[in-house]
């Protein structure tokens, strides 16, 4: 049932072109000119009038939430807060009836996320779920929502559910932004068109698997890793580090690249591999200068770059080239090599990739 793959995780990584097609199916029209999400249409006024969006989630789903913040702020011009459900539920959070609370959860059973939406409902907020498991507790306890439709995820480390969550958040931001008149027609059309091409671009990233596997051998015995990204790719740096930690048991940290100089750069020496996302976008020059700072301190840098990039290539130790896309969609491509790096390093270390120690697929206790 692993379909010829040695692990469910690898199978699920390779399924992503298909799972994202399923996620978009019936939501993006065949001409790729329009997005419709029934959960949004049915509650259009709520989304138009919302004063604020609060996203609650845990772990990988929380990282998807961070990307959601960038998307909703850019396309809907609404303030967004992203909260760890476990912290939110035990603070005294200020929740208004004009707020929309979005819970993101693969399993739909995460105890802290469920408690957080309970709190939000009592405060009178409109609660929306982004879940994968149909009929699970979170969808049953929300006012509305959208399923990610990526199929059963078996590997404990979330991969295909994460990219499907980002895809749903992107479609939501487009649909709401259009209703609110906050996104230009050109941008709306350009992002939808690109989104419809993401599955084939992921195929192209997956074709790099062999070279990523080879690269991973060089870094298998590193004791620590740092992941850097900015803008839309900052949450991907966090997610890349989490994937490595949970399945290889190597200590890793993700940072917004510019934060390095505020402390963590002290860690850099030639035994510290740094995975830097330096794709060709609005923060490219900034990330390049952050990489220069790392190289000046003898850090070893693996960079994720856009195909055809020259300046980063001449600067770093290893490059992984991915297709170019709309900046807001880059996370869907940049997350793939980081999933593969974590996977191969864990396999090299003989780890139980699908069932890492101390972890459970769904965390139903707090
Ligand atoms: C990481 C991972 C966890 C989950 C977290 C939330 O790979 O799987 O961090 O993302 O436990 O789970 P869900 O999304 O089911 O609420």
Image (cartoon, rainbow, N blue to C red):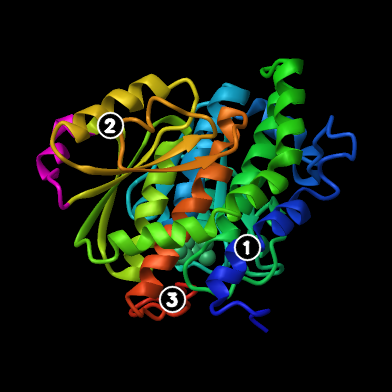
Query: Badge 3 is on which residue?
Result: 353
Location of the C terminus (image quadrant): bottom left
Give the class, few, some or many, for how many residues have Cα within 10 Å of label 2's Cα (few <14, many ≥20): many
Q: Secondary structure at mark 2?
A: helix
| Span colored in magenta | 260-271
Q: Which mark is residue 291?
A: 2
Residue visible at 34% across and 53% down in the picture: 87
Residue in the foreground of this view, choosing between 149 and 318: 318
Contact (CB < 8 A) between labels 1 and 3?
A: no
Q: Is residue 350 left or right of residue 22?
A: left
Label 2 to label 3: alpha-carbon separation: 31 Å
Q: Which mark is residue 14?
A: 1
Eyeballing the image, is 312 above or below 137? above
Q: Residue furthest bottom?
A: 1
Residue 228 is one of the magenta-drawn residues: no
Residue visible at 15% across and 39% down in the picture: 298
Q: Residue furthest left?
A: 266
Q: Name the image quarter holding residue 68.
A: top right
**Of label 2 and label 1, which has the lower sequence position?**
1
Q: Cβ(mark 1) to ligand 1 < 8 Å? A: no
Label 1 to label 3: alpha-carbon separation: 15 Å
């Amino acid at each position: 049932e692993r379909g010829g793959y040695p692990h469910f995780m690898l199978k699920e990584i390779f399924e992503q072109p298909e799972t994202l097609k399923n996620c978009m199916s019936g939501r993006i029209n065949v001409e790729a000119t329009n997005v419709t999400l029934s959960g949004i249409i049915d509650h259009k006024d709520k989304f138009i009038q919302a004063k604020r969006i609060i996203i609650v989630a845990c772990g990988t789903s929380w990282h998807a939430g961070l990307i959601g913040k960038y998307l909703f702020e850019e396309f809907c011009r609404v303030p967004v807060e992203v909260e760890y459900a476990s912290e939110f539920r035990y603070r005294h959070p200020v929740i208004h009836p004009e707020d929309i609370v979005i819970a993101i959860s693969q399993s739909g059973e995460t105890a802290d996320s469920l408690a957080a939406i309970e709190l939000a409902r009592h405060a009178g907020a409109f609660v929306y779920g982004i879940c994968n498991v149909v009929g699970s507790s979170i969808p049953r306890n929300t006012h509305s929502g959208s399923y990610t439709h990526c199929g059963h995820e078996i590997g404990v480390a979330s991969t295909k559910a994460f990219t499907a969550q980002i895809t749903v958040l992107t479609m939501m931001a487009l649909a709401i932004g259009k209703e609110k008149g906050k996104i230009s027609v050109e941008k709306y059309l350009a992002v939808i068109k690109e989104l419809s091409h993401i599955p084939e671009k992921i195929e192209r990233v997956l074709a790099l698997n062999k070279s990523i596997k080879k690269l991973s051998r060089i870094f298998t015995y590193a004791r620590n890793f740092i992941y850097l990204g900015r803008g839309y790719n900052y949450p991907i740096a966090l997610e890349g580090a989490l994937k490595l930690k949970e399945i290889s048991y190597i200590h890793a940290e993700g940072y917004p690249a510019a934060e390095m100089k505020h402390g963590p750069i002290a860690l850099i020496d030639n035994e510290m591999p740094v995975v830097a996302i330096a794709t060709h976008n609005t923060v490219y020059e900034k990330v390049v200068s952050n990489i220069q700072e790392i190289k000046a301190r003898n850090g070893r840098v693996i960079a994720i770059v856009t195909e055809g990039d020259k300046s980063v290539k001449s600067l770093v130790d290893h490059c992984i080239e991915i297709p170019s896309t709309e900046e807001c969609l880059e996370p869907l491509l940049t997350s793939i090599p980081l999933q593969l790096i974590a996977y191969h390093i864990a396999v090299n270390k003989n780890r139980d990739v699908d069932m890492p120690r101390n972890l459970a697929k769904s965390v139903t206790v707090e």
